[in-house]
Amino acid sequence: MDLSFLLLTIISRLDGERSIYASYHLLRGKRSGQTLQDVEYYSLKGFFCILPRLKIDVFDGAINHLKKAGYISIDEDSVVYITKKGKEVLHTLPLYRFNGWDYRGREHVFFSRLSLIVQTASYFRADQKSFMPMQNDYDIQLFVKEFLLKQRILDEEFSNQLFQELRNSIEQSGMNGCQKTIFVHRLGGYKHAGWTWKQLSDEMGIKPFTLSLYYIESLHMLLQTISQSSKYPLLTEIIKNIQVSTYLTESTIKTKELFNQGMSMQKISQLRHLKMSTIEDHFVEISINDQSFPIEEFVSATEIAAVVAKSSELGTKRLRLLKEEFPSLTYFQLRLILGTGSRGGAKWISNQSC
Amino acid sequence: MDIKSILLKKFGFEHFRVGQEEVIRNVISNRDTIAILPTGSGKSLCYQLPAYIKNGAVLIISPLVALMEDQVAIMKKNGEKRVVAINSFLAYKDRQRIMNRLDLYKFIFISPEMLMQNNVAEQIKKLKIAFIVVDEAHCISQWGFDFRPDYLRIGEFLKQLERPNILALTATADNQVLGDIINYLRLETPAVHKHSLDRKNISYSMKQMNSEHEKTAWILERTKKTAGPGIIYVASRKRADELAIYLKEHGISIASYHAGMEQEDRAFIQEQFITGEINWICATTAFGMGIHKNDIRQVIHENMSSTIAGYMQEVGRAGRDGDLSAATLLFTEEDIGKTRFIVQNDLPTETEVRHYFNLIKEGSSKNEATQLSGISETGTRIIDYYLERMPMESALLKIKEQKTEKEKQLQNMLHIINGENCIRKSLLKFYGETLVAAPASCCSVCGLGEEDWLFEMKRGNSTRQIVDWADRLARLLQS
């Protein structure tokens, strides 16, 4: 797995519609109206926020690599296109199983909890009650302490069960060989300290960045497996509150509350001292994520049908092009339509490859 | 309960180590105390034990975050959970949580910067403080090898308190530094305990080399043929990584260790080193802290140290178990110039100070002024401290004095490196000690005696291998 090819997959969906930096913001999980909207319009939820600390020079490097290879082109407005040659390699790319939208970096909290629990179980099995914890975050330590207090940790049965659950869920998750190796070697215990990224990279002959992509994907896969099964009671407890409980940004939640109380957009804007455009962003975000959003208060059913049909016909979700077709509608209305249109499945997005 | 029973019950030791008991008795009897004890002699016991006899919390002022975090982790590991570290790296939410319940803690580690924040100081003033510990107390002296202006402010903070007693701890203090400690901390007729810094089980070698290449070749031979575990100190993070890779390619069990690594990876390396999964660590001198291992057999310096005190502290990590250990320092002619440049560059020049001063006067922020005048962060801290207290001309004089001092320290080190006298003797002389009897393995000048032990001991062979995932999981949870 390689950043360039990951980007090629993303770009294949944004083909001719968005600037090259849309994919950068996507990977870093920027919580702006534009990025949140892109995630929906182009079915990119899985990739959202998987690399929150991605550096711009690393990103640029990966993009240059794709340009040089002739897989993509970028026009003078920075809009990115996938080339014929790029399309030809698409089918050779792996099917990614990221689920960034649901976890947004919280997968690392899960792993830290697990790491400390495994370390503790391992040391306790060896009758070592005092050791240096590999995780020094207070919240992690507190969680693990509370978790362990509920378990019969002195009983070997505890670590046996943890072992069984981990082995079975890893098996079931569909991780590939590399991912299983990385995952278990990042865990450590008595007489078996964990491996650093550098050590894994040297030993496995895989670049550190690729390792981390494999690793993040494997966490998402495992989390998915655990959350969908009742066979892993210990792990189910460990993944508590890892999945994000609301997809809305905090500011949007406030706006939504006021809207639910019956306030108009103008009123909310005044009360919150926020620009009207920000409130519009919030409404688009709500319309995307909330099935019960009353879109008919803003646009008519006929308008929705017409815009959806046109968008499908032209094969675009670019606002500027649609605005030319529907001059009577505002940009805000168009965004609402595109947002709700993409809600609950991608029936009419199927002209996109992948 | 008497102190011997506490020693056994709380710490599991039957006997005190040399020097500890006297210090502890002084602290218990409410006397200001200065303890100069060599690195690795169990300094922390000197405040931990009296804490269990006295009511109230112990406030421990410590200069380095890494050191502080480390001490907290060790104490927690040993079962004392009422311990906390307050420093600027603390996340806001954690800081709020801790500051609101400071009364929960028996041991409060704090950095001098935090002590200067009013809200923090206010909270501390509300506490009942048993006594105050100033760790690494030599940092208070501008003659010390790592002078920290923030330390001078400790004295100012103490003025606000109804003064509890103070225990000043350090591994290195000559008379000049000792005077500064007494003076700035306003100690009242302190009891001074000084113990020989001579570590008989460590042999000292200084080896002149012709090139960097020769050094690398020497280190390779050495790590191939002689006993670990050991630490190799290098000048930069980049070099630490490079050298570790090179040695690893030649079959040496080694990893680099420095502040540029993420926390989890650092913890892994430390654990691997302590359990013997890896035999060598390649570290920067700036980040040697945090490694607590008693059986370190060798410390190798790839470059010249800029001060004797710093050198002694790094070397002091070897042989805490009392068994024979070897310290080797490699240097080239060029190293001397390089070291001088680095040392002198730390302090701002007169032009830079004037520029900085004018920028501040014209209304620039401190950050802007620092950047525009090109002064290092340490440099700014020093200037700020002086400029707040004296006119610029005097501040400039102070900085000039410090430059001279740094050069003097460098000369002291050079004297030892180039000298024809016993290295052990010279090191001790620096601290005003006289060597009574040299051990058989003394130094590269007197002779190292039979060094067979170095070559005979079996080298830790690296058994670290990637294993099948299910096997590894079983080893962690089923063995």
Image: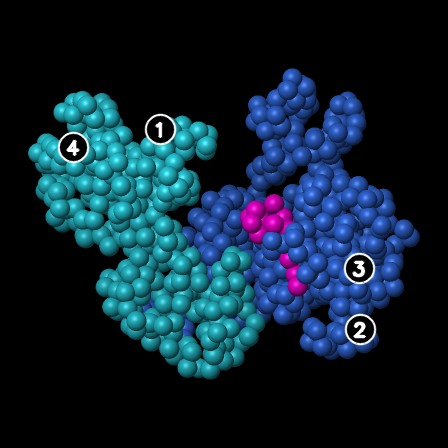
- Residue at image location 56% in from the left, 49% down from the top: B93
- Dot 3: element: strand
Nearer the camera: disc 2 or disc 3? 3
Query: Does residue A113 belong to the magenta stretch?
Result: no
The part of the chain drawn in magenta is B82-96
Residue B318 position within the rendered picture, expressed as x and y whole percent measured from the top left? 62, 61
For disc 3, the marked residue is B130
For disc 1, the marked residue is A277
Q: CA distance from mark 3 to mark 1?
A: 58 Å
Taking depth in this image into account, of B314 and A130 the one nearest to the observer is: A130
Which numbered marker is on residue B3? 2
Tag 3 subunit:
B
Residue B287 appears in the picture as rendered: no
Chain letter matching colour blue = B
Could you confirm whether marks 3 and 1 are on the same chain? no
Query: Does residue B91 belong to the magenta stretch?
Result: yes
